[in-house]
Image (cartoon, rainbow, N blue to C red):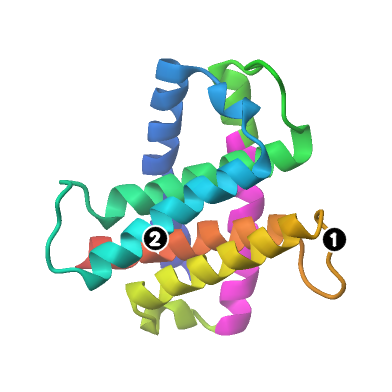
Amino acid sequence: MQDTSKQYDAVIAKCRALFINKMRDYGSAWRILRLPSLTDQIFIKAQRIRGLQQNDVRKVDEGEVSEFIGIINYCAMALVQLDKGVVEQPDLNTEEATELYDEKIAITKQLMLDKNHDYGEAWRDMRVSSLTDLILQKLLRVKQIEDNAGKTIVSEGIDANYQDMINYAVFALIHLEAN
């Protein structure tokens, strides 16, 4: 499990660096996005990954890695939006946004560690394509919850689904880096 924690941190370090650089380029423009818009952005990335996994021909010179990183960062943004709400104008500087990013990722990593303990690192025997499918399933669940005005009867909420997507994407990146 110690190895998983280090591998997780290494993946997140890359995602975090990109998040910070994009904050420097664009500021916190993402703060105006409503949750369904973020969900759709994540969906586009997951669909592209699935297409790359199924198609022999690639017409854009970007692979799965950049898309999984995008999923992680968009999910972190969505978790921030869940807590802080949507704004009409960007309202966070790079330092504030990074603190919120780190907070959401720390909570999500702890969830991964707890589940990883209980599941015995079963993800290590999964295929990247299966992790992609699970992310797409979580996205369909989130869309349904959004259509239900955020209400669930017996299921986990939107936040748990975004956290699971982050963790599945991290696992996929760990697998891809091992190959």
Q: Which quadrant of the rendered structure holds the C terminus?
A: bottom left
Residue at horizontal 38%, vertical 33%?
18
Judging by the rendered image, the residue that carries numbered circle 1 is 151
Q: Which residues, given as a range, are shown in magenta?
A: 101-119
Check if residue 27 falls in the magenta segment: no
**Rendered location of residue 106, percent (x, y):** 62, 48
Is residue 121 shown to the viewer in this render?
Answer: yes
The amino acid type of the residue labelled 1 equals Lys
- The Cα–Cα distance between marks 2 and 1, rounded to whole angstroms, is 26 Å
Q: Main secondary structure of the magenta part?
A: helix
Crowding near pointer 2: few (<14 within 10 Å), some, many (20+)?
Answer: some
**Rendered location of residue 22, percent (x, y):** 41, 25
Crowding near pointer 1: few (<14 within 10 Å), some, many (20+)?
Answer: some
Check if residue 113 falls in the magenta segment: yes
The amino acid type of the residue labelled 2 equals Gln
Q: Residue furthest toward the front?
A: 147
In the rendered image, the vertical position of residue 113 relative to residue 85, given as above or below: below
Residue at horizontal 54%, vertical 61%?
165
Camera-nearest residue between 152 and 111: 152
**Quarter of the image where one finds residue 101:** top right
Sooner in the amino-acid sequence: mark 2 or mark 1 = 2
Residue at horizontal 29%, vertical 53%?
65
**Quarter of the image where one finds residue 3:** bottom left
Camera-nearest residue between 24 and 153: 153
